[in-house]
């Protein structure tokens, strides 16, 4: 008879201890873009709701952005770098495919020999990474996990293409996940529409991002609200119980359509896209971190996170606000 395997002691639940964010210093307004492409402030705001966005400096890549956000989340959590044993970096804008960037971020933060990997689910990446972190904690594979969404979308944008250069931007957001006696991260609802894989695409290493805006808009405004509602149901709450709804900051019209269909009448709905643009996997932690810092949402209350984008991939979960 073969010997049985030992299962490590695991936490019954997982929760987010703290968030952190980083926004590059350079602000690019709609009026500035109008100097190089045929557009204007009113046209951009009417279509995507963006007034300005942040663009990283030449010497700021996803590692540097991730270090800033991860360091802030770590400081806010009260943990030491030695307490972190897993680092997950969600990104779809890596400068190079190999090696991964999570280990570099960990090293720069003084985290010694953690498990470390990059995760690419595009704009849904942070929600995928957060679900993975929670599962690792509950399985006993990690004690404390640093989850980062870091993107430098500007290096993949054709700045002469009006349909994309007005949308995408740079930044990073992070969260620290730890064990808890009760669930602080609800069940994830995730999936994909692989038949629409070509609606948002970077074709090869020499290409720029391209998207079929109307097709993505129709998909997001019809398919995502039911996913969000299911995440609430699996977490045992109603949309009316939510204190915050934090969708991926893709387009203000999409965000507002999802919120209307969800009928989360008591929730503050994140609109960070107005001043930060679309930062893909970074957008959800960027938005929620700012909401927490401003005191817009109460600690301990439920917040719904909803990521969706290229792939087409999506994921949603309810968390307790740290």
Image (spheres, rainbow, N blue to C red):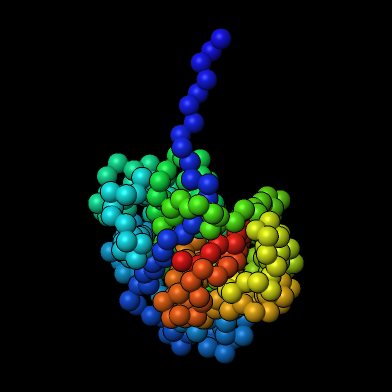
Taking 252 as reference, is 147 above or below it? above
- Name the quadrant containing residue 229: bottom right
Measured as percent of width and height from the top left, residue 319 is found at 55, 62
Q: Farthest residue toward the top?
A: 1
For this view, does 107 lie left or right of residue 191?
Answer: left
Taking 209 as reference, is 294 above or below it? below
- Name the quadrant containing residue 39: bottom right
Residue 144 seen: yes
Measured as percent of width and height from the top left, residue 150 is found at 42, 60
Q: Farthest residue toward the front?
A: 181
Residue at 59% in and 62% down: 318
Taking 102 as reference, is 231 above or below it? below
Judging depth in this view, the residue of 102 and 95 nearest the camera is 102
For this view, does 224 lie left or right of residue 164?
Answer: right
Residue at 40% in and 50% down: 144
Measured as percent of width and height from the top left, residue 182 is found at 54, 54
Residue at 69% in and 53% down: 193
Taking 85 as reference, is 313 above or below it? below
Judging depth in this view, the residue of 135 and 208 nearest the camera is 135
Residue at 50% in and 84% down: 51
For this view, does 44 lie left or right of residue 53?
Answer: right
Measured as percent of width and height from the top left, residue 101 is found at 36, 49
């Amino acid at each position: 008879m073969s010997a049985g395997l030992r299962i490590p002691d695991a936490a019954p639940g997982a929760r987010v201890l703290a968030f952190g964010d980083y926004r590059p210093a350079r602000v690019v307004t709609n009026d500035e873009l109008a100097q190089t492409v045929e557009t204007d402030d009113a046209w951009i705001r009417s279509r995507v709701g963006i007034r300005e966005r942040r663009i990283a400096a030449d010497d700021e890549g996803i590692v540097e952005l991730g270090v800033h956000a991860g360091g802030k989340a770590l400081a806010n959590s009260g943990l030491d770098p030695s307490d972190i044993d897993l680092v997950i970096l969600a990104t779809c804008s890596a400068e190079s495919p190999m090696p991964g960037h999570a280990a570099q971020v960990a090293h720069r933060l003084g985290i010694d020999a953690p498990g470390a990997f990059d995760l690419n689910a595009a704009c849904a990446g942070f929600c995928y990474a957060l679900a993975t972190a929670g599962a690792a904690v509950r399985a006993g594979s990690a004690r404390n996990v640093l989850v980062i969404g870091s993107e430098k979308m500007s290096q993949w944008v054709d700045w002469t293409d009006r349909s994309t250069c007005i949308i995408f931007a740079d930044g990073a957001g992070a969260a620290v996940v730890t064990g808890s006696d009760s669930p602080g991260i609800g069940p994830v609802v995730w999936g994909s529409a692989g038949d629409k894989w070509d609606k948002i695409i970077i074709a090869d290493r020499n290409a720029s991002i391209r998207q079929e805006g109307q097709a993505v808009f129709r998909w997001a405004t019809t398919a995502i609200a039911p996913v969000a509602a299911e995440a609430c149901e699996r977490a045992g709450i109603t949309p009316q119980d939510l204190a915050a709804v934090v969708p991926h900051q893709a387009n203000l019209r999409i965000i507002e359509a999802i919120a209307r269909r969800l009928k989360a009448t008591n929730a503050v709905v994140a609109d960070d896209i107005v001043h930060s643009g679309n930062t893909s996997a970074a957008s959800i932690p960027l938005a929620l971190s700012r909401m927490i810092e401003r005191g817009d949402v109460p600690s301990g209350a439920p917040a719904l996170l909803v990521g969706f984008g290229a792939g087409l991939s999506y994921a949603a979960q309810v968390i307790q606000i740290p």
